[in-house]
Image (cartoon, rainbow, N blue to C red):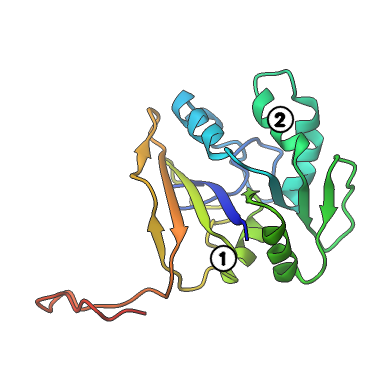
Amino acid sequence: MGLIHIEMFATLDLVGQAPGRPEEDPLGFAFGGWQAPLMDDVAAAQIGASYEGTDALLLGRRTYDIFAAFWPYQEGGQDNEIATLFNSVPKYVASRGKPDLSWAGSTRLGPDLAGAVREVRDRHEHVKVVGSLNLVQTLLREKLFDRLDLWVHPIVLGTGKKVFDGGAVPTNVTLLEPPVATPKGAVYLRYGLADGTPGTGDMSAPDRGAGRDG
């Protein structure tokens, strides 16, 4: 069985909508492209390294449409390495509709999304989920992920779709690496899915109520 890696870019108030550019997801959202002014060489290197070993992409419909209109034309440019990867690996699309699957290697998943994702994980070693906030809610709810790479950026928007927006259930995660801050103030956090559910305690108790595991 392979691994499912979710990659998310978020603000300090955990808005994950349209980080890349204004037209990415503009409906009712005036801050599309909020990540661009906060990008630096350290963040770019972190993002590039996070794709090491990726052999499939798992995408929601909107993210797929954006990628399919962009990445096939970026080979040979400044993003050649990621473009070459994206264009060469299989792409799996979660959609209730009928997306245009003309991007080479693209497949629409069936109506049983959780079951289809499990099949994809069985088929590949490292499945990467990029953006795709609606799809991420399903993966969080079903605990269908193995790693969550989260870049938290030093801005607050107060509006927009959140990373944990109606899909999350009580879940334990474990920090896999020490957090790393970029020169422009983004913090890179890498978490792995852990067993069980969050425990509780009592801060007034001598041992803080340790041992009340979920």
Quadrant housing the N terminus: bottom right
Which residue: 90% across, 47% down?
100
Q: Are marks 2 and 1 in contact (CB under 8 Å)?
A: no
Q: Amino acid at mark 1?
A: Leu
Which residue: 86% across, 60% down?
97
Q: Which mark is residue 140?
A: 1
Choose between 36 and 138: the one closer to the eye. 138
**Quarter assignment of residue 184:** top left
Does label 2 or label 1 sit earlier along the sequence? 2
**Quarter assignment of residue 86:** top right
- Residue 121 place in picture, x, y as percent: 67, 59
Placement of 169 over or under 16, stated as above or below:
below
Residue identifier under label 2: 83
- Residue 170 place in picture, x, y as percent: 46, 73
Placement of 40 over or under 88, stated as above or below:
above
Residue 205 is left or right of residue 64, and the answer is left
Q: Nearer the viewer, mark 2 or mark 1?
A: 2
Quadrant housing the C terminus: bottom left
| Residue at disc 2, secondary structure | helix
* Mark-to-mark CA distance, 2 and 1: 27 Å
Q: Amino acid at mark 2?
A: Ala
